[in-house]
Amino acid sequence: MDDLLKKHLSQFIIRYDKDGIIPYLKAEDFKGLNVKEKSFVNSKGIEIHYFYYNYENYNETKVILFLPGLGPGHTAYLREINKLCEHGYQVLTLDYCGCGASKGDNLISFYEPTVEALDLLNMLELDKRIYVIGHSLGGFTALNILNHRRDINRGVLISPIITLKNQFKAFTGYTEDLTEVLEYESNNSSGYSSLANIPYLTNTNDDILFIHSKDDPIVPFNSATGYIKENCKNKSLRFMCVENKYHNPNYTLEAVKLYNELNNKYLSLNNKEDKIKLMKDVDPFVLTEQDEIIWESIFNFIK
């Protein structure tokens, strides 16, 4: 096993859980928001949990599949999920293998969310109009779904990874041979690693909205949305490129600033008690305040 594959496995193919210190919102924090939790067994025999969110009198002809980014599950995105539900949509989401409420020792692969999301859709056989929205790794997953499923043709990609190869090189700085990393992903992707996203984006008639901040340090703009904007001259693709929003372009500038300040302090602390003290008075609503202009653009796009 080469060093790049070891780095890939140790950094990304791990178990993701909440640390009990960083505050997360819950469904009951939103008055009237309904949640129903269910589960299915994935192709590896692991129990995966999925969730329906909605308010009363939601539109029963449509559903939004919301795909979380890398981390301890979908509850990191309850503010976004609630926004969609407030607008009359029902939201379907899931915790990937090795994340949050789902079982599993680790994430398995970058493509495992794609495998599980498609397995979930195939199992449910929803007789509804399906939209996909995803952030970061969830944006990559949403893109893979759009590429694979011909009946799903509208999606919103927020700070999305476009290809594993581009992301790995941009994020790690490595330019050496990625053969073993790509082979590992291919062997654990149920065939989905063969999806060619750049040719798809060049030629598709699907309607796709990209939302990305030009200073994103996690999914660098120029290796992802910026690359597509520059090289894929396709009128079906729309772009909302913002400044100073880092990896969360749908947050307000104030929330992004607070998030970055807290994150930098949090990472600098080694003592758990100091971390608890730092976070104990943090209001997760303030920390995740949403940018209404961004959401207006999203709702105008998917209506």
Image (cartoon, grey):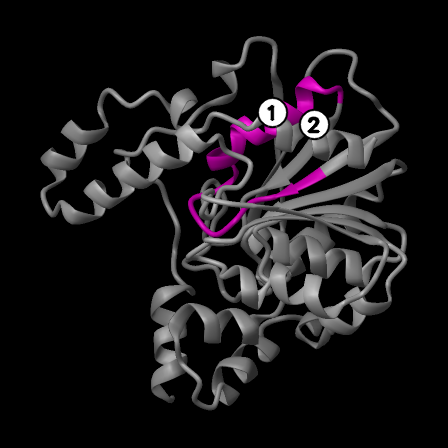
Secondary structure under tag 1 reads helix
Q: How many marks?
A: 2
Contact check, label 2 and label 1, Cβ < 8 Å: yes
At label 2, which amino acid type do we have?
Answer: Glu
Q: Residue at x 10, y 34 (%)?
A: 273
Decide which of 278, 38 is in the foreground and name it.
278
Label 2 Cα neighbours within 10 Å, binned few <14 / some 14-19 / many ≥20: few
Q: Tell me where residue 37 appears, x and y as whole percent.
A: 60, 30
Where is residue 93, by image quadrant?
Answer: top right
Q: Is residue 52 something that shows in the picture?
A: no
Label 2 residue SS: helix
Determine the residue located farthest toward the top in the rendered image: 31
Nearest the eye: 6 or 116: 6
Q: Position of residue 81 (x, y in %)?
A: 60, 29
Of residues 212 and 190, the one nearer the viewer is 212
Q: Which residues are magenta?
A: 65-88
Asked if residue 239 is positioned above or below residue 220 in the image, the reply reads above
Q: Is residue 74 magenta?
A: yes
The numbered disc on residue 292 is: 1
Q: Is residue 98 left or right of residue 281?
A: right
Q: Relative to residue 5, is residue 145 drawn left or right?
A: right
Residue 231 visible here: yes
The part of the image, by quadrant, that contains residue 203 is bottom right
Q: Is residue 238 left or right of residue 110?
A: right
Q: Which residue is mark 2?
A: 296
